[in-house]
């Protein structure tokens, strides 16, 4: 790759800028497909045209939304290997039209049993983030393959082998490397080139990222998928793939490394004993709608839900735009203070979910909001006074501004089923460890623990799931699907979903307008992260006058969603027009 291209795809740095300097929009790249589609018979929206097409093809052949979602996800494992794949985990929220209820499957990675709170500590200090991330230690026991199998077996109509077919074909035939793909390699170059297997797959022989415009094939991943197709989940959690995962994470094979890659402690037992969990969704009522989200160990549903409960006390839609934006930022600030203190894996910590989502607790938090921005970090409230029990008040953990990767897909079918699915390998490029001979990257999900604390609810513990921000959301109106949205973006997932919901429900935007709306993310930090285009909005000067301080970040989130139109089965599917290179939305039968 020549230097000109290299510079064009250099990682974008978050920098603090003054309001006056803010101009322009988020970094733009050509979209991969139409970002919106209206029609009936089923719909899909993902970040990638191949993936959306695979979902639509499945729907055309009679598959339901769960089948199509898994089919699309398997393709994303091929085309979006730095954000997702079988080396990671995720959360699936589903509306089952026949049962008329929302259900969720937690496919989150778990810490190996042998890990304790000080797993990431050396010489009395926690490791720096990059040392923790690029290591075997950060690799959680992957949940995706068992998650897919569970979803298909219990709510699908096709086999795992059928769902993997389009992905296998694409992995073998290849696809064209675009600027986003090359940029994601470039972001990791200094570490990818330490690991021979990663380097061999993603770097050119001269050590630069694969060139934009060249065809990328991954026959090793095709064979791994085929093995899973043939043997089911045992093709992944047992046998040669399992052995290779253990080798790659326990003894990272690095050569000519300019970094130290610490070994992990995962065992065969950890892999074999992994299981996904069906969990009750979170639920809040908002403006007469029923908003369902992902419960703990994700903090998505509870934090979005608490913020909505706080906002339900204001007529956002009839206030000046500047004031409604102020209130959304403040509600988010308060909800994040509580998220930091009370959210963790419920198998290890009694999360006071009932209190956090109660109207009384929301009222107590709302009472703190004034005309001026609150000064963060602010402390958590006391949800115990409002129902449920818990593990005791956690200590505040301020949120870091790490933006990871991940991908979100939205699917619906002709029967009215809906799937909202976010899956991830955590950071863009995960741990950087490719499983040699099998073509997939291992996650670094365990850095989602508060690994720098020995006492916080979200500290590292053997077998535990790290707290997530993933927020797949399904909104019902009168018991029927009305809207589904979700996004990647680390802890900015939560603020992205909150903004999408308030933009659509309160501020009168259509779903595509809400997806395109310039974003800001307030997570109980002194400054609010904002896209350059947000800083250029007419109302932002008034927000600054209220005491909001902004730092700029090039892009926040990359969402997809579906809006259900009326009761004749018509839908509007939407993906990002610009962020992350743009996404792709399709429907089975387009409306003329
Ligand atoms: N690991 C993150 C989480 O579960 C998601 C990754 C991301 O989008 O950054 O919250």
Image (cartoon, rainbow, N blue to C red):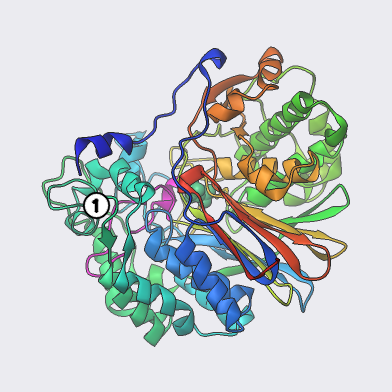
Q: Residue at x 20, y 44 (%)?
A: 1
429 up-or-down from 377: above or below:
below
Q: Residue at x 74, y 17 (%)?
A: 372
Image location of residue 253, percent across then percent down:
18, 57
Q: Residue at x 35, y 47 (%)?
A: 179
Residue 1 seen in the figure: yes
- The magenta span reads 425-449
**Disc 1 element:** loop
577 up-or-down from 417: above or below:
above
Residue marked by disc 1: 210
510 up-or-down from 562: above or below:
above
Residue 296 seen in the figure: no
Q: For the residue carrying disc 1, how many other residues have a C-alpha within 10 Å: few (<14), some (14-19), or many (20+)?
A: many
Q: Which residue is drawn at 66% across and 25% down?
A: 378
| 431 drawn magenta | yes
Q: In this view, does 174 lie to the left or right of 491?
A: left
Q: Is residue 429 left or right of residue 201?
A: right
């Amino acid at each position: 790759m020549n230097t000109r291209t290299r510079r064009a795809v250099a990682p974008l740095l978050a920098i603090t800028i003054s309001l006056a300097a803010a101009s322009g929009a988020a970094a733009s790249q050509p979209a991969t497909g139409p970002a919106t589609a209206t029609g009936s018979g089923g719909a899909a929206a993902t970040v990638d045209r191949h993936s959306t097409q695979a979902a639509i093809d499945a729907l055309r052949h009679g598959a339901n939304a769960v089948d199509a979602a898994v089919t699309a996800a398997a393709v994303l494992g091929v085309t979006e290997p730095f954000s997702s794949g079988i080396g990671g985990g995720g959360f699936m929220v589903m509306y089952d039209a026949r049962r008329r209820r929302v259900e969720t499957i937690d496919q989150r990675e778990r810490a190996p049993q042998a890990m304790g709170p000080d797993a990431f500590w050396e010489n009395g200090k926690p490791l720096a983030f990059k040392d923790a991330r690029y290591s075997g230690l950060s690799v959680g026991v992957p949940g995706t393959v068992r998650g897919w199998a569970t979803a298909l077996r219990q709510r699908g109509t096709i086999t795992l082998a059928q769902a993997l077919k389009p992905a296998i074909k694409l992995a073998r035939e290849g696809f064209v490397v675009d600027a986003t793909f090359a940029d994601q390699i470039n972001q990791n170059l200094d570490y990818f080139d330490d690991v021979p297997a990663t380097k061999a797959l993603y770097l050119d022989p001269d050590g630069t990222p694969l060139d934009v415009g060249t065809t990328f094939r991954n026959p090793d991943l095709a064979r791994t998928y085929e093995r899973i197709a043939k043997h089911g989940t045992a093709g992944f959690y047992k046998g040669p793939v399992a052995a290779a995962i253990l080798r790659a994470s326990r003894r990272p094979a690095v050569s000519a490394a300019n970094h130290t890659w610490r070994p992990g402690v995962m065992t065969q037992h950890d892999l074999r004993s992994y299981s996904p969990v069906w969990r009750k969704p979170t639920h809040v009522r908002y403006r007469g709608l029923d908003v369902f989200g992902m419960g703990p160990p994700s903090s998505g549903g509870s934090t979005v839900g608490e913020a909505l409960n706080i906002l339900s006390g204001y007529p956002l839609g009839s206030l000046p735009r500047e004031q409604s934006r102020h209130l959304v930022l403040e509600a988010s600030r308060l909800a994040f203070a509580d998220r930091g203190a009370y959210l963790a894996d419920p198998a290890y910590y009694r999360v006071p979910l009932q209190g956090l989502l109660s109207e009384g607790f929301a009222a107590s938090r709302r009472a703190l909001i004034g005309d001026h921005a609150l000064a963060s970090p602010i402390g958590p409230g006391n949800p115990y006074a409002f129902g449920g029990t818990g593990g005791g008040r956690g200590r505040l953990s301020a949120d870091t501004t790490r933006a990871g990767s991940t991908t979100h897909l939205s699917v619906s079918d002709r029967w009215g089923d809906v799937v909202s699915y976010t899956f991830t390998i955590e950071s863009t490029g995960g741990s950087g460890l490719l499983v040699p001979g099998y073509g997939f990257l291992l996650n670094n999900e365990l850095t989602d623990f508060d690994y720098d604390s020995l006492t916080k609810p979200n500290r590292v513990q053997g077998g535990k799931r790290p707290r997530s921000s993933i927020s797949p959301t399904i909104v019902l109106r009168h018991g029927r699907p009305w809207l589904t949205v979700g996004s990647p973006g680390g802890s900015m997932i939560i603020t992205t979903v909150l903004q999408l919901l308030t933009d659509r429900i309160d501020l009168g935007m259509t779903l595509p307008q809400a997806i395109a709306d310039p974003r800001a993310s307030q997570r109980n930090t002194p400054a609010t992260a904002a896209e350059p285009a947000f800083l250029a909005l007419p109302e932002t000067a008034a927000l600054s006058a209220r005491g909001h301080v902004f730092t700029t970040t090039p892009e926040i989130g990359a969402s997809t969603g579906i809006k259900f139109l009326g009761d004749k089965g018509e839908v509007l599917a939407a993906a990002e027009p610009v962020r992350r290179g743009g996404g792709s939305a399709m429907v089975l039968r387009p409306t003329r």
